[in-house]
Amino acid sequence: MLPLAPAPRPADPAVAYQTARGRLLVGRAEDLLAAPALDDLRGRVQLIFTSPPFPLLRPKKYGNRQGDEYAAWLASLAIPLTKFLTPTGSIVMELGNGWNPGTPTVSTVGIKALLAFQEEAGLHLCQEFICFNPARLPTPAEWVAVRRERVKDAFTRVWWLSPTPTPKADNRRVLTEYSGAMRKLLQRGTYSSGRRPSEHKVGRRSFLADNGGAIPPNVLVPPESDTPTEPQAVLPIPNTASRGGYHEKCRTRNVPRHPAAMPEPLVEFFVRFLTDPGELVLDPFAGSNTTGSVAENLEREWVGFEADPAYAEASKVRFAA
C-alpha cells in the first residue's frame, strides 16, 4: 500500500508590496484572518485600526452588504480579529451612517453591526468617538438638498474596543494646544474656586498645572479653515481629502483612487494614543492603505489586507520607494 501523500501546503497570501516596516496582502479579510501563514501575527497586534465597508444602500465598487446580512458578516470577524491582539491591544473601528430606502429615516444597521461585533467577542467599549466633517456634501441629497426635510449627515462613529477594560493607552501622546483663554489662565495663576452648579468642588489651583497641552475630547473636528488663527481645542481632521497627496498622485499616475480614503490625522491620533514605536498595527480593510502609511511614518510595524488588487496597487503611491 502506497504511503499517503502529504497534504498540500496552503498557498501564502499574495503580497502587493512591502516596506522596511510592513506589507500589504491581497485577499478578503475573512480568508486572510484564517490563513495559517499569518499564525506568527496572532497575539502580536497592539492596534487594529480599520474602516470596514459601510452598510450603504447603494452598491459601491469596493463592495458592501446591507441590513442584517451586514451585521452578521461584521460580527463573524470579531473573534478572528481579537485573536490577533496582544492582551492589552485595541480595536478601533470607524463606521458611517446609512438611510432607509425611499424614506427620510436613518438606518440602525450600523449601530446594530457595531453592537453585534462587540457582543460576539465579549469586547469592552472603552470609548465612543464622533468624527465630524462640516465640509461633507449635503447628503442624503433627496431629503436635504431637494425636499429640504433633513439637515446634512456630517459625522461617522468611531468605536474603541478591547478585550480588556484597561488596554494600553496614554492621552499625553495626543495633547492639543491650549486655547488662548487657558494660556492666560496659566499666566494669571488663579481663578474662581468653590462649588459649581454641577456640585463639583473646584480648588484654587485645581486646573493650574501646565501639562504641555489640553486633553482632547472624544469629538474629533476639522479646523474651520486651512490656516486657523487660534489653536484648535479639538483634534484637527482635514476635510479636503480630495486635494490630498494620495488623490493627487493617483490622478497624476492615472491609477484608480479608492472612493473612501481615510483622513491621515484620524489614524495618527489613535496610533499615537494606543501604541508605541515598534509595535504592530493591522488594518484588515486597508483600502488606500492610510493606516500602513501612517504607521510607517510613526515607526510602527504594520500589516494590511485589501481585497481589490487595483486598490492595493494604487496605494503604493503613499510610499516614496
Image (cartoon, rainbow, N blue to C red):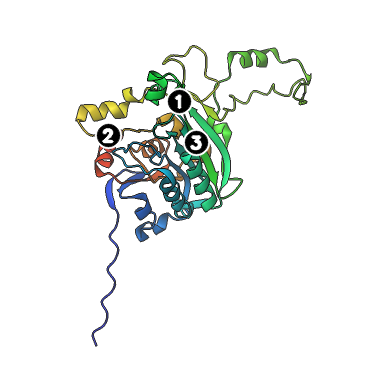
Give the position of the N terminus as an image quadrant. Answer: bottom left
Image mark for residue 158: 3
Q: Mark 2 points at which residue?
A: 317
Q: Where is residue 257 in the image (x, y as percent from the top left)?
A: 27, 33
Image mark for residue 173: none
Where is residue 24, by image quadrant? Answer: top left
Q: Nearer the viewer, mark 2 or mark 3?
A: 3
Q: In this view, does 103 lie above or below 310?
A: above
Q: Nearer the viewer, residue 105 or 12?
A: 105
Q: Mark 1 points at which residue?
A: 154
Q: Where is residue 213 in the image (x, y as percent from the top left)?
A: 58, 24
Q: Is residue 45 left or right of residue 256?
A: right
User: In percent of the image, x 28 and y 74: which residue is there?
Assistant: 6
Give the position of the C terminus as an image quadrant. Answer: top left
Where is residue 154, by image quadrant? Answer: top left
Question: Dots 1 and 3: beta carbons under 8 Å?
Answer: no
Callout 3: helix, strand or loop?
Answer: strand
The amino acid at mark 1 is: Ala
Measure the C-alpha gap from mark 2 to mark 1. 28 Å
The amino acid at mark 3 is: Val
Q: Residue furthest left?
A: 254
Evaluate whether residue 214 shows in this view.
yes
Measure the C-alpha gap from mark 2 to mark 3. 26 Å
Evaluate whether residue 89 shows in this view.
no
Q: Which residue lies furthest to the front in this view?
A: 102
Q: In this view, does 182 lie above or below 318?
A: above
User: In percent of the image, x 29 and y 66: which residue is there?
Assistant: 9
Question: Dots 2 and 1: beta carbons under 8 Å?
Answer: no
